């Protein structure tokens, strides 16, 4: 169970700082906080340690992650409840519950990346899976096998912003058999790309394709939109929502929804510009480099 030891919550200090400045503890003896992407429990652990009177509700669709989180958060058992679910289902799970704060980290965690059986990483050979919830039917291998060149090209462009999307899609469909492993896919991508691109320092040639497939397999953008639509009805006055995203499409969705809420007088945006990790954090955790944090505060008595 020590697979989570290398997992570092991104922008954790900033998350705690925003909660400290905006959690209305004075008027709420026991603030209710929802960690909508519980993962290994990094954010929730820090929140429970820093806000001694709060209660946390943690949800995640990855049962493997929840098992790790349950062990890590055992000492806070009286103040945390954990559920196996997608964050797009929060209103169905808690139809009458309201919260003082919400936290969402939309990235894939280190513990998922290092587990080759999950198929998230282009650095570790394993089954081409990529399902956050292994109970879902559709795998990345299924996607590559079932969709045609144009459909794959659209996925790679929209979710991966890959400039060689069509070239890679054609190479995938021209492969002589079903692609079953991450290693096979990486090899196909490498061989499809022009040599100068393959030699580009600092960027793995398969990174954007793997990102695009993961987003598509898990329907991440639609899940995000569904979750955001449910949040206003689940908030106490002065509640704050913090979202860390890693993809320009996700960040754009969050930014536009926060602007919509502000325009409709539901509250105010707390982050005029997205907050990014500083150089020290990037040096300590290179995977944090693309993170963007945005926060919003609901104020219903304006």
Image (tube, rainbow, N blue to C red):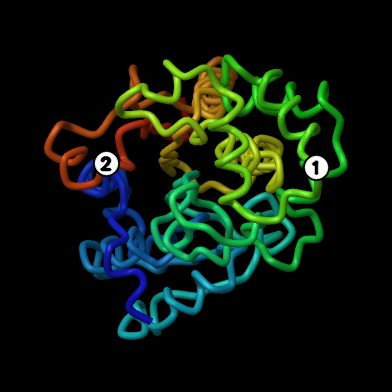
Foreground residue among 264 and 228: 228
* Whole-percent x, y for residue 285 in the image: 24, 46
* Whole-percent x, y for residue 175 in the image: 76, 38
Q: What residue appears at the point 71 percent right and 29 percent down from the top-left corner?
A: 171
* Whole-percent x, y for residue 170 in the image: 76, 25
Marks 2/1: CA distance?
36 Å
Q: What residue appears at the point 49 percent right and 69 percent down from the top-left corner?
A: 65
Mark 1 Cα shell of 10 Å, populated few (<14), some (14-19), many (≥20): few
* Front disc: 2 or 1: 1
Residue 82 sits above or below residue 243 on the image = below
Classify residue 243 as left or right of residue 165. left
Residue 222: image quadrant is top right
Q: Mark 2 points at which residue?
A: 286
Q: Mark 1 points at which residue?
A: 176
Residue 157 sits above or below residue 57 on the image = above
Residue 122 sits above or below residue 194 on the image = below
Label 2 vs 1, first from the N-terminus: 1
Classify residue 255 as left or right of residue 42. right
Q: What residue appears at the point 36 percent right and 22 percent down from the top-left corner?
A: 200
Q: What residue appears at the point 74 percent right and 22 percent down from the top-left corner?
A: 154
Disc 1, SS: loop
Foreground residue among 212 and 52: 212
Disc 2, SS: helix
Residue 245 sits above or below residue 140 on the image = above
Foreground residue among 13 and 21: 13
């Amino acid at each position: 169970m020590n697979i989570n030891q290398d997992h570092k919550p991104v922008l954790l200090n900033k998350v705690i700082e925003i909660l400290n400045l905006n959690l209305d503890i004075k008027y709420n003896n026991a603030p209710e906080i929802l960690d909508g992407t519980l993962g290994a429990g990094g954010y929730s652990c820090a929140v429970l340690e820093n806000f001694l009177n709060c209660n946390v509700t943690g949800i995640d669709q990855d049962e493997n992650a929840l098992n790790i989180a349950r062990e890590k958060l055992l000492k806070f058992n009286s103040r945390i409840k954990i559920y196996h679910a997608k964050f797009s289902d929060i209103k169905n799970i808690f139809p009458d519950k309201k919260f003082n704060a919400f936290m969402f980290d939309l990235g894939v965690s280190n513990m998922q990346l290092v587990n080759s059986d999950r198929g998230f990483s282009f650095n570790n050979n394993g089954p081409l899976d990529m399902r956050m919830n292994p109970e879902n039917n559709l795998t990345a291998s299924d996607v590559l096998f079932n969709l045609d060149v144009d459909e794959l090209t659209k996925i790679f462009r929209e979710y991966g912003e890959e400039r060689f999307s069509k070239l890679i899609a054609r190479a995938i469909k021209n492969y002589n058999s079903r692609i079953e492993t991450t290693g096979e896919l990486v090899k196909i991508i490498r061989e499809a790309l022009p040599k100068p691109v393959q030699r580009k320092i600092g960027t793995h040639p398969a990174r954007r394709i793997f990102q695009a497939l993961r987003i598509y397999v898990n329907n991440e953008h639609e899940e995000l939109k569904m979750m955001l639509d449910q949040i206003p009805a689940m908030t106490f006055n002065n509640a704050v929502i913090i979202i860390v995203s890693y993809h320009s499409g996700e960040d754009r969705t969050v930014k536009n929804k926060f602007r919509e809420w502000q325009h409709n007088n539901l509250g105010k945006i707390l982050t005029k510009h997205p907050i990014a990790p500083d150089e020290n954090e990037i040096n300590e955790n290179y995977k944090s480099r693309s993170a963007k944090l945005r926060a919003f505060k609901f104020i219903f008595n304006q």
